[in-house]
Each structure stands twice: as structure tokens, then as C-alpha cells.
Amino acid sequence: MPNDTDRSSNRRDFLAATAAATATGLALPSLAQESTEEEPLFKISLAQWSLHRTLSMDPSNEGKDNLRFPEIAKKQCGIDAVEYVNAFFKEKAKDKAYLKELKARTDDLGVKNVLIMVDGEGALGDADQQKRQQAIDNHKQWVEAAKYLGCHSIRVNAQSSGTPEEQSRQAADGLRRLSEWAKQHDINVIVENHGGLSSNGSWLAGVIKSVDLPNCGTLPDFGNFKLGQTVTEADGVKTVCERTYDRYRGVNELMPSAKAVSAKSHQFNQDGNETGTDYFKMMKIVLDHGYHGYVGIEWEGEHPGEMEGIRLTKELLERVRSELA
């Protein structure tokens, strides 16, 4: 996460650019407009976390920055579909007036609300059945909010504890019960590879298969395949090794039940390619599974800034889309 100085500087620069763009009635020139083709090979959305250094998650902000997010996506990034993160309006899930205003803004802008990423509401695979039920209940408000906003899904986590087999059973139970309830609202419950066992593509695919409900699926993320660390010591020297799961294998395993896709990006080279993920190889995997829905830009790099990182990711996805078509 950035320090306070970096965050404040980033935010000041961004707000200044926004004000200038608004004053002239123009979008920022560095960001290309979204493709106008009627039936693209896949569609592009913007994950709100891409702007987590710029938009406030402070409760005292009362979700005001979240209300601005759809306009930023449309007018400054040229993207007409958005993926929310509940942390930006954590206290507003049941605030009907707030949700009405947010929906009115997206309707006026012609922006599609795709999904809400939900964190901090408890572990759906908690080993304690009472805590698991509480987590299920905590997520229900976001199902209702997603339904009101016209989203198709909420993104959840498969956090649990115990042996891999125990975690699989517990996570499947929590996901099944939440999905059964969400089905009444025509909302999908989708799980992201998001650390721990969920970053093991085979394990998570098995959990979803065990749930066996049409509205319970996955949100494959190109970059979240860290399994944890291994520490070894020799001659008094400790060595820490990051254990990772092969990202291409993982996405391939998760795509059969995918209802959204997260295009994670951290760094670009001079040719405009993401240095950690071969987007052409990855998107071919996605498309080979017959997926033609939204691919959400999720910029997490520190340099360049957020708006430039979003632009570079969008241009890469558009290039991939054009060449693979």
C-alpha cells in the first residue's frame, strides 16, 4: 500500500487533472476511447481497485468518491462498465437513497454496473459454523445492493482454515448456502483466486464443482496466484521463497465456471506489454473457453500512476482483442 505522502500527492495531481478536464468539457487526452464495435471479442470494464490510491475508502468520505467513480471511468478512461469494491462505500449497502443516486448517475452516463467485489464481511469457509453463518448473512446486503444496481454478480472470497480437505468442505458449504439465497435475486456468487488455497486453481475449481450451482462460479485473476512463503535456514542464514501457482494453468482451470475475468497488471515494458503476464497467451486461454464477457482492468502497479496504468492496460487489451479477432 502507498504511504500517506504518496497517496496525497497522487490524489492532488488527479483532482487537478480532473478539474482541468471538466473545465474544458474534454476527457483527459492520454486515454483512448472505448471501441464502438457492436459485438467485440470481449468487453472491457474497469475495476475500482485500479484507483485505490486516488479514491477515498475513509468512512468520513461517506462514499462520495465512489459516486464519482462511474464518471471517471466513462469520461476520463473511455470505459463504460465498472466493477465496484465494497470498501469504497462500506456503510452504504442498505442506504437506498445512496444506491438510487449511484444508479441514476450510471444510467445518465450510460455506464454498466457489472459486479461488486466484497471483502471484510467474514470467512464464508469459517471452521466455526456460527461464524460461517454470520459471514453468509453479512454478504446478503451486498447481493441486494448488486441486484438494485443492475450488477450480475458479487465477488467473494473462499477464506477458510484447516486441512485442504476441510477447507474445501467448509468453503463449499458457505458458498452453496449464499448462492442458494442469491439465486432468488438472480445474482451470481463468484470466487476470485485471492490468496491461500484459493490461489491453487485446481483446489478452487474443485470447490466450485462441489457447490454445483449454476450461479456459483469464478472470477479468474491473472496475477493472484501466490500460495505463501517457504522459509529455509542454512548456516544461520534464512532464505524466503515465494511459492506461486502457474498463472496460465490456474486461469485455464478456473475458466470453465468463469462469469468475469480480472486483467491484473503491475508493470509495462517499452513495447506496451505487461511484464508479468503474456496477455496474448492468457487471453487466448480465456477465449478458448468460449468467454466473451467483461474483462476488468485492475492496475496495481506503483509506476506509472493510476490513470496511465489504466490507459496502458486498456490499450494492451484492445490490441489483443484486435489481433486475436
Image (cartoon, rainbow, N blue to C red):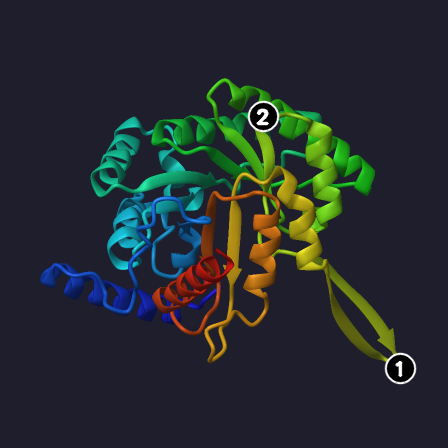
Q: Is residue 144 left or right of residue 215?
A: left
Q: Is residue 79 shown above or below 3?
A: above
Q: Is residue 132 shown above or below 62?
A: above
Q: Name the residue at 48% across, 27% down.
A: 187
> Does the residue at mark 2 contact the one at mark 1 (Cβ under 8 Å)?
no
Q: Is residue 317 shown above or below 115?
A: below
Q: Is residue 222 among the parts visible in the rendering? A: no
Q: Name the residue at 69% across, 28% down.
A: 211
Q: Is residue 58 left or right of residue 225?
A: left
Q: Name the residue at 63% across, 48% down.
A: 193
Q: Badge 1: how crowded within 10 Å, few (<14), some, or many (20+)?
A: few
Q: Which mark is residue 235?
A: 1
C-alpha distance separating marks 2 and 1: 50 Å
Which residue is the extreme one toward the front? Answer: 325
Which residue is the extreme one toward the right? Answer: 235
Residue 20 in the image: state x and y as whole percent: 15, 66
Seen from the viewer's position, the closer of residues 293 and 299 is 293
Q: Quadrant of residue 258?
A: top right
Q: Quadrant of residue 124?
A: top right
Mark 2 element type: helix
Of mark 2 and mark 1, the one earlier in the sequence is 2
The residue that label 2 is drawn on is: 178
Residue 210 in the image: state x and y as whole percent: 73, 30
Residue 129 in the image: state x and y as whole percent: 70, 26
Q: Name the residue at 37% across, 28% down.
A: 94
Give the residue type that dot 2 points to: Leu
Mark 1 element type: loop
